Image: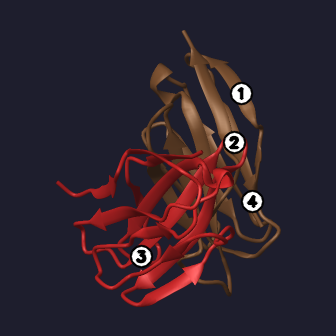
Chain colours: A brown, B red
Amino acid sequence: QQPVQSPQAVILREGEDAVINCSSSKALYSVHWYRQKHGEAPVFLMILLKGGEQKGHDKISASFNEKKQQSSLYLTASQLSYSGTYFCGTVSYGGSQGNLIFGKGTKLSVKP
Amino acid sequence: EAQVTQNPRYLITVTGKKLTVTCSQNMNHEYMSWYRQDPGLGLRQIYYSMNVEVTDKGDVPEGYKVSRKEKRNFPLILESPSPNQTSLYFCASSIRDGYGYTFGSGTRLTVV
């Protein structure tokens, strides 16, 4: 089952913040986050493993709540370059580590 | 340069004519995977491989075959393509469990 992402789309002004959520019906081993710009391949942002950790680089960070089977991606002080579609991918406990299942994506548009 | 190489980038074919999309990575990655991307559906996993001669079905394997005879190569075979296999296909690889995936540039396939 695909994880569920929300919102489906969001429009921001430069400098505003956004949160993208990813929720699974299964117990999770890890959560991946990727960004895909129009006409390009997805690019890996970060991975979160069990333990409720929070990771980040630059002004993009993420959290993983293992008990709630949820992850959130936080984009702060958004820049025009943040525009694109964000995908979360999940690997379930008890499943194969190669079975990375993606959500349907969240389209983020940053306006000047 | 470390990369995942897919060929061809674009392909138009007729129903029933067997085709192969090649995927090669030069990073000695253990995990390789094929996804198809369709509007509104996100990235759906077709097949994945966790090592040489180890492959397994993803969420949408019907109509596709794969093989992993060498670590670097993971071709996707459509024995008898149909119009509902028209899609954008991505190959991706990861060094192992707990690491992100590197995606190829994609293959846009049209079956008429």
Q: Nearer the viewer, residue B107 or B15?
A: B15
Label 1 and label 2: CA atoms lie apart by 9 Å
Q: Quadrant of the N terminus of chain A?
A: bottom right
| Disc 1 and disc 2 in contact, CB within 8 angstroms | yes
Give the CA separation, mark 2 to mark 3.
Answer: 27 Å
Same chain, marks 1 and 2? yes
Residue at the spot of label 3 = B31
**SS type, badge 2:** strand
Q: Identify the image quadrant of the C terminus of chain A.
A: top right
Mark 2 sits on what residue?
A20
| A72 up-or-down from A76: above or below | below
Residue picked out by circle 4: A3
In this rendering, do the residues under marks 4 and 2 share a single chain? Answer: yes
Q: Which residue is pictured at 59% across the width and 55% down the height?
A: B15
> Would you say B50 lies left or right of B62 here?
left
Amino acid at pointer 4: Pro
Circle 1 residue: A10
Image coordinates for residue A70, horizontal then vertical, percent: 74, 60
Please report the residue visible at 38 percent of the width from the left and 72 percent of the height from the top: B74
